[in-house]
Image (cartoon, rainbow, N blue to C red):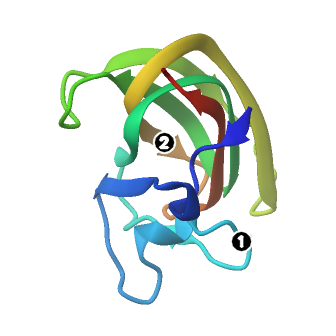
Amino acid sequence: MLDIALESAGAKIAQASSYDERYPPENIIDGTLDTLWPTSGMFPQEFVISFPSLMSIGMVKVICSNVKNLQIQRSIKSEPIEFEMLAEKELENLEGQMQLEDIKVPITSTTHVRFVIKSGYDHFVSIHRISIDGTAVQ
């Protein structure tokens, strides 16, 4: 399986609940840990990663800071609508240190993956990198 949540693999950020031109949401899929996407300080916060075609996924890796409760949802529609829950995870409080989470999701097909940050351990959280193991559905 390949990391399909990379801009270089055709992934795009379709939506994000907050925006700072210094830290755009595209930083999540740029493939580096040197960049990040910070939230605006209110919850919930969310972003959607869209793929160029239908993908089969099975594992999601999240590198973030101060995230408490995270939901992962999928949509197979052509537009990022009508999402259904894949996983929900409460992350450990590492007091501002990087959180590295491997979240197993049921092997499923998807065109869009929405990440909903329901709560954080601080007013602001950051997402540094999302990695999704997957392959194109033939």
26 relative to 75 in the view: left or right: right
Q: Which residue is mark 2?
A: 119
Q: Amino acid at mark 1?
A: Thr
Q: Which residue is mark 1?
A: 32
- Please name whichever residue, 137 or 107, is drawn nearer the observer in this view of the structure: 137
SS at mark 1? loop
Give the image location of residue 61, x and y in percent: 71, 40
Q: Is residue 81 left or right of residue 88?
A: left
Q: Locate residue 71, reporting x and y percent.
A: 49, 29
Asked if disc 2 and disc 1 are in contact, CB closer than 8 Å, the reply is no
Q: Residue furthest bottom?
A: 22
Q: Amino acid at mark 2?
A: Ser
Answer left or right for 73 relative to 67: left
Query: Mark 2 against mark 1, which lies toward the viewer?
Result: 1
Q: Is residue 88 at least partly visible in the picture?
A: yes
Between discs 2 and 1, the one toward the N terminus: 1
Q: For residue 132, which quarter of the picture?
A: top right
Residue at x 46% of width, y 17% of height: 109
Q: Can you give x and y, in whole percent of width and height, for residue 44 in the image?
A: 35, 44
Residue nearer the viewer, 20 or 120: 20
Q: Is residue 94 above or below residue 133?
A: below
Question: For the point 30% across and 22% down, which residue is it?
Answer: 76
Q: Which residue: 65% across, 58% down?
A: 129
Residue 45, numbered circle: none
Left or right of 3: which side holds 127? Answer: left
Residue 133 location (% of width, % of height): 68, 34
Q: CA distance from mark 2 to mark 1?
A: 25 Å
| Label 2: element kind | strand
